Amino acid sequence: MSQNLTLAQHRERIAAARESLAGFDSALWQAPSGGAPDGLAGLMSEVDALGAACEAAKVSITAEAMDRGETGDGAAALTVTQWVRAHAPSTRAGGAGQVVAVAVAFGKPVNAPVADAVRAGVLPVRSAAVVVAEADRLRPVLAQGAQPHVLAGLIEMAVQHGPRGCRMVRPALLARYGRDGRLQLEQDAAARFVALSQPVEDGTGVAEYRLTLDPEGKAVLEAALGPLSAPSPVRGECDLRSSDRRRGDALVQLVRRAVAAGGAVGTNPKAQLVVTMDWEALAAGVRGAGTTVGGSDTGTVLAPETVRRVACDAAVIPTVLGSAGEIVDQGRAVRLFTPAQTRRLWLRDGGCTYPGCSMPPHWADAHHLVHWADFGPSDLSNAALLCERHHTIVHQRRLAAHVVAGPGGDRVEWDLTRGSYDQLLARRAAQEPA
C-alpha cells in the first residue's frame, strides 16, 4: 500500500518513525524477557529491518540524484560519493562508496535480482556491493547461460553469510559454472604466491612468521593440523590453550615429526582425500571436486589436476553420487603405493625422474604415470618419482612418460610435449574394445 503514497506522505511517515525512536531506550525495561516476539529479540529484528529499509532508500535516492545530474550541479560541484557524504552524514564513517556502487548497479538490467533483494530488505547494502563486485569479476569467465545461476548463488550466500561468505563461494561457482579449465588456471596461478617469511623477533623470544598458501597447500596443511590441534585434556583437566596456541603447537609438532623421519619412507599416506562428484561429472571428466582432506572437511574446492596431484600419494576415498545426489558407491581408503614399492622406486629411479632434476629420492613423491583417476594401476610399471615442483609441472602441462627396459635396468622416459598425456589417453581409448 505504501507504494501508492505521495512523496510528501512518505516524508511524513519517515519523520514519524524517527520521532517514535526518540527516548526509545527509556522504554526498553517494559519489554518481556525470554525471546518473546514482543520482547527484546523481536524488537531488535524490527529495528534491524527498519535500518535495512533506510539503507535501501539511500540507494534509491542516490540513483535518482545521479539520473537527474544533481550531484554535479552548482558552483560547489561534488562527486557522487561526496554528495552522499554531504547529505547522509552517517556515511562519513564509511559506506558512502558502497551506496554509490549499488546505486550504479541498479541501473544495469543484469543486476535486477540484486536490486529486488535490497528493496525487499533481505540483502543489506554492504553485502549487495560485494555481490555486484564478485558478479562483475566472475562474468567474463563463466560458461554461456550461467550468469543468472551464479548471481542467485552469490545473493543467497550474501544473505546467509554476509560479504565474507559471498567472496568464499567463488571456487565452488567456478567449478560448477566456469569455463573449462578456469578453476585450474586460477589455482595454478595462486601457487606463485606461496611464501613463508623470515621470522620477525621482538627481542622477548617471540618470533612471528607470515605464511601464504594456495588452495592445495591450505587443504593439506589444515588436514594435518586438524587432529593435532584438537583440544587435548590432561588427566581430566580441560585444555585451556586458545585455538591459535593449539594450532601453533601442532605446526611445530608436524615439523618435528618430519625432521625425525629423515629419509625413511612414511608409514602413512601424506593425506586422506575424499573426492565427491556426481555420476555425470565422473563420466564426462572432473571439472572440479569438493574435497575432505585428512578426515577434516576443509570446505576446499580443488581443481581437477590438483585433485589428481594430491591423489598420487594420498589415501583416496572416492564417493560417487547418483544423478539425484544419493551415494551409490564409496570405496575403502587404500594406500596407492606401499612403503616397499617406494623403496623399490628409490633404487630404480635414484631421484626425481624429470629430465635435468637432481632432487634425491627421499624428497620425491611416487607419481602414477597413468593417473589413478584414469584407472591407472598402482604398479611399479606405472610409477615414477617426481619432486614436488616437477610433480606440479607434470600435472599442469599434462605430460606423459613410460617405463622402458634397458641394459642397466628399467628407467623412466618423459615426453615433454605439452598435452602428451592426453594423447596417451586417446591412444589407450582407441585400443580398448567398444
Image (tube, rainbow, N blue to C red):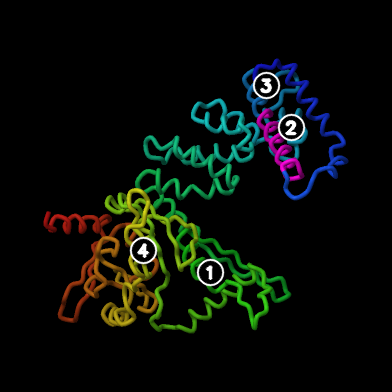
State which mark lies toward you, 2 or 1.
Answer: 1
* SS state under label 1: helix
Q: Earlier in the sequence, mark 4 or mark 2?
A: 2
Nearer to us in this view, 55 or 217: 55
* SS state under label 3: helix
Which residue type does callout 3 highlight? Ser
The CA distance from mark 1 to mark 4 is: 21 Å
Q: Percent from the top left, x then y, of residue 11?
A: 76, 21
* SS state under label 2: helix
State which mark lies toward you, 1 or 4.
Answer: 1
Q: Which residues are magenta?
A: 37-58
Whether pointer 2 and pointer 3 mark residues with C-beta atoms closer than 8 Å, the reply is no
Q: Earlier in the sequence, mark 2 or mark 3?
A: 3
Q: Earlier in the sequence, mark 1 or mark 4?
A: 1
Which residue type does callout 2 highlight? Arg
| Residue depicted at 69% across the width and 23% down the height | 71
Q: Earlier in the sequence, mark 3 or mark 4?
A: 3
Q: Percent from the top left, x then y, of residue 423?
A: 21, 55
Please give the label number shown on residue 309: 4
Q: Is residue 190 above or below residue 258?
A: above
Quarter of the figure with the N terminus: top right
Residue on which disc 1 sits: 226
Residue on which disc 2 sits: 85
Q: Does the magenta run of residues contain 39? A: yes
| Residue depicted at 76% across the width and 45% down the height | 40
- Disc 3 crowd rating (10 Å Cα; few below 14, some 14-19, many 20+) is few
Which residue type does callout 1 highlight? Gly
The CA distance from mark 4 to mark 2 is: 52 Å
Q: Is residue 109 left or right of residue 417?
A: right
* SS state under label 4: helix
Please give the label number shown on residue 2: 3
Please give the label number shown on residue 238: none
